[in-house]
Image (cartoon, helix red, strand yellow):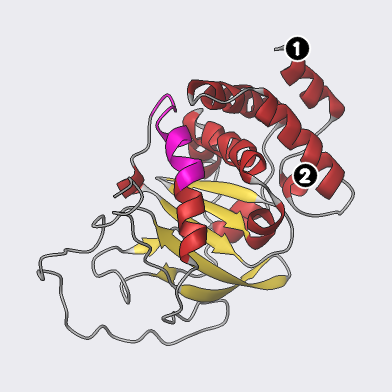
Amino acid sequence: MNGFASWSERVTYGKEIIMKFLRTLVVVALAAGCAVQSSGQADRRPQPQPQPTAGTPTPSNKKVDPAVVERLQRVMIPLMAKMNKPLAAKDVKVGIMDDPHINAASAGNGEFYITTGLLEKANDDQMRGVLAHELAHDDLGHVAKAQRLGAGLQIGMVLLDQIIPGSGAVTPIAGQLISRSYSRKEEYAADKHGAEILQRAGFSKDVMVNTLTWLNETEGGSGGGFFATHPATGDRIEALKKG
């Protein structure tokens, strides 16, 4: 049995207005047993059904593709383990938003968001580069700083109690995160530290260089996606090459 066999996904779909689009949000709890008591001790009582309101997700029982879960495990775990402040799989949730643009964001506290565009268009190394960059933002305190500055826009919660008793809710700021830009200085720092995380995990820093180059070619002129919230220039790529 391989290391991924003990992992399980717990997901919920919800609809949420993010910027000008109606998105579907899937939440993947990465580690088995992190929120569900497996010995029958979990509260099995019927949960009250939330009344949907404008901009509030309505949960359903759809399942995420197991291959997507396995891929997230394979890509993220080695990187999470090599952060300055390592994240354990049991403490991580990944929200998947139905958006064709390539993008990702961190909400802090082990919550990350990626788009279907990233999942569909990126190979594993490109996904590593994007996620290493987001992990670096979290590791360097950029997410906490943004939250202190008020990035807590209430746009509706994705309630997980319907599927994972006692798990609570994902931070209701995904839309704010996806529409937020970091400073130029923070982007340079996240590029550099993301490359360090990749190297600690046994990958070349060229993964980050190649990822930024690919993103520039793929999304640079689209007016949306990663570079709408993570401004990129040739200078950033050159800085990584020289660093």
Q: Does residue 25 sit above or below 101 in this rendering?
A: below
Q: CA distance from mark 2 to mark 1?
A: 22 Å
Is residue 168 shown in magenta? no
Q: Residue 199: percent from the left, percent from the top?
A: 55, 21
Residue that numbered label 1 is attached to: 242
Residue type at mark 1 is: Lys
- Crowding near pointer 1: few (<14 within 10 Å), some, many (20+)? few
Which image quadrant is residue 153 in? bottom right
Q: Which secondary structure, mark 2?
A: helix
Badge 2 or badge 1: first in the primary sequence: 2
Q: Does residue 172 sit above or below 200 in this rendering?
A: below
Q: Please state the extent of the stretch shown in magenta in the rendering.
A: 74-85
Q: Does residue 222 sit above or below 9 in this rendering?
A: above
Residue extending farthest to the right is: 221
Q: Residue 1: percent from the left, percent from the top?
A: 29, 50
Is residue 83 shown in magenta? yes
